[in-house]
Amino acid sequence: MNTELVVGLVSISDRAAGGVYDDKGIPALEGWLSRALRSRWCVETRLIADEQALIEETLISLTDEFGCHLILTTGGTGPAVRDVTPEATLAVTQTVLPGFGEQMRQISLNFVPTAILSRQVGAIRRHGKSATLIVNLPGQPKAITETLEGLKSADGKQVAPGIFSAIPYCIDLIGGPYIETNPEVVLAFRPKSALRPVVS
């Protein structure tokens, strides 16, 4: 079994994919993961347009061909006509995990009332004997960090957990590698029975 976490990062934007402006989603995600993960990991990145067929094809390729354990998408989750990331995600997955979207919206509502317009989803794609967790994140780097890390008080204490706290255990449950995080960034939560000795 591969003990290295394989992460797919997909930025979905017509204008960034078309070269109108530089993509900020993938650099933000790579930077955050570099701070948050203690375990070995590697990444596959894709910058694509808001086309549902293309998004579906990309997600299938990253799971079935590249063996990603986790895929994080950014962009395309609003109510605009071209925002089809949730539809594409649900079309290629079998198991929906509503809590991811619920918690992201709850966190973002502390900052902007328009968080209720977001349609992010979390779901699992099963392919053969393997499975991949796919999570749609917001499009802005600041919102990406907030939803992954959660809310913290001025003295750094956790007020509301970010969604990444639940991701390592979810990866455990679907047969992926054991992920250790940097608790100063985000603390992975597992029941005591699922904890393993920390590898230094």
Image (cartoon, helix red, strand yellow):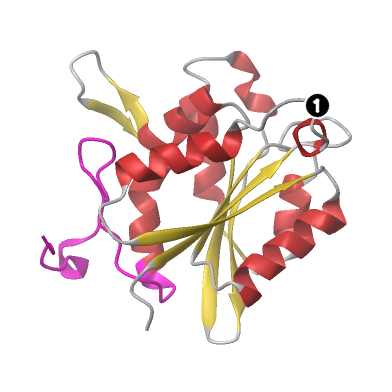
Q: Quadrant of the C terminus?
A: bottom left
The span picked out in magenta is 172-200
Residue nearest the observer in this picture, 93 or 99: 93
29 magenta-colored = no
The x, y position of residue 55, in whole percent, is 77, 54
Number of residues whose C-alpha sits closer than 10 Å to that of mark 1, classed few (under 14), some (14–19) or many (20 or more): few
Q: Residue at x 64, y 76 (%)?
A: 65
The x, y position of residue 109, in whole percent, is 52, 21
Looking at the image, is 120 positioned above or below residue 142?
Answer: below
Left/right of residue 146 with respect to residue 93 in the rendered view: left
Main secondary structure type of the part rendered in magenta? loop
Residue nearest the observer in this picture, 142 or 79: 142
Q: Mark 1 points at which residue?
A: 20
Looking at the image, is 181 positioned above or below residue 95?
Answer: above
Looking at the image, is 73 positioned above or below residue 158?
Answer: below
Can residue 103 be seen in the rendering of this structure?
no
Local SS, label 1 = loop
